[in-house]
Amino acid sequence: MRYHSSISPKYAAMLDAAVEVILERGNEGHRKTVNALVKGETEIRVVRLDKIGCSGVTGLVNRPRTNRRIRAGHMGFIESLGEVHITFADWTFETAGSRGVEGTLVHEGLHAFDFAHIISSFSRAETDPLEIFDLSLYELERRAAVASGEYLSLIGAPDYVHEGQQLGLVMVDDDGTPRVDIGGIEARMQNGYGVNHLDQGVMISQLLRLRPRDSSFSLRGMLGI
C-alpha cells in the first residue's frame, strides 16, 4: 500500500493496525487480499465524508494511464494493484474507529484485488483471450459483502456483530453464534444496487471504462481514452 499525502500519521497508524488485526484474525481470503495490498502499490487516500457519502470507495488512480499500460503489454497482478486507489472517508477513522477501518479495508480491499485482476487479465487479452477476468456489479459487490460478513462474524465482538446485523451482513443463530446472512446480502444487493443473480448489472470493466489489449491501432487507444 502507498499512503497518499492526505493520510495523516494518526490515520496511517490506524491502517497499519487494521492490517495486523486482519492478518491475525481474518480467514484465508482476508489474509490473501491484505497481503496483496501490502505487497502492491495501491494508493490509500482520505477525503471528507461529504465527498463520497460512504465509508470508502475504490477506483482507478488514472484511467487513461491504465488503459495505455494495458495496451502496452503484460502487467502482473501486483503491478496492476498500483493502478488502483482506495479512498476512505475521514468519518471512518474519526467516528467508526478501528472497527470501521478494518471493515472498510476488507470490503474495499477486495474490490481493489478484483480490479487488479481485471487490469492484469486485460493486459494479456491478445495472447490469452480465454483467460480474461471480469465481474458483474452483482458479483463484485456480493463477494465483498460476503467477505465483510465473514470478517465481522469471525471477530465476533458485540459491536462488530451488531454492525453486521445493521448492514444485513450477519445473522445470529439461536445459540448466539454469528454467521454470514446470505438472505440479508441478497436483499442488500437488490435494494442497494438494483441487482440480483438474474439481473447482475453492468460489467466492472465497462464501469471502469477499461479495454482489453488487442493488436489493432487507434488514436483513442494510444491515448488511453
Image (cartoon, rainbow, N blue to C red):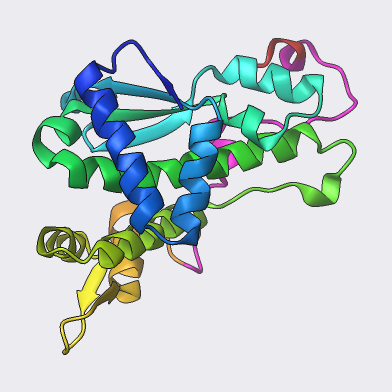
Q: Residue furthest bottom?
A: 174
Q: Is residue 171 left or right of residue 84?
A: left
Q: Which residue is at a point 65% across and 28% down the rendered structure image?
A: 79
Q: Specify the quadrant that holds the C terminus.
A: top right
Q: Nearer the viewer, residue 27 or 173?
A: 27
214 drawn magenta = yes
Q: Which residue is at a point 26% across and 27% down the rendered structure image?
A: 13
Q: How many marks?
A: 0
Q: Nearer the viewer, residue 28 or 53?
A: 28
9 drawn magenta = no
Q: Position of residue 169 (x, y in %)?
A: 27, 65
- Residue 106 appearing in the image: yes
- Residue 138 appearing in the image: no
Q: Position of residue 198 (x, y in %)?
A: 51, 68
Q: Which residue is at a point 24% across and 69% down the rendered structure image?
A: 170
Q: Is residue 210 left or right of residue 151?
A: right
Q: Is residue 223 left or right of residue 33?
A: right
Query: Which residues, given as a range, are shown in magenta?
Result: 197-221
Q: Which residue is at a point 15% across and 63% down the rendered structure image?
A: 157
Q: Nearer the viewer, residue 144 or 186?
A: 144
218 vs 92: above or below: above
Classify residue 77 by image quadrant.
top right
59 vs 103: above or below: above
Characterize the magenta stretch by its predominant secondary structure: loop
Q: Is residue 139 left or right of residue 11?
A: right
Q: Position of residue 90 (x, y in %)?
A: 18, 26
Q: Nearer the viewer, residue 37 or 60?
A: 37
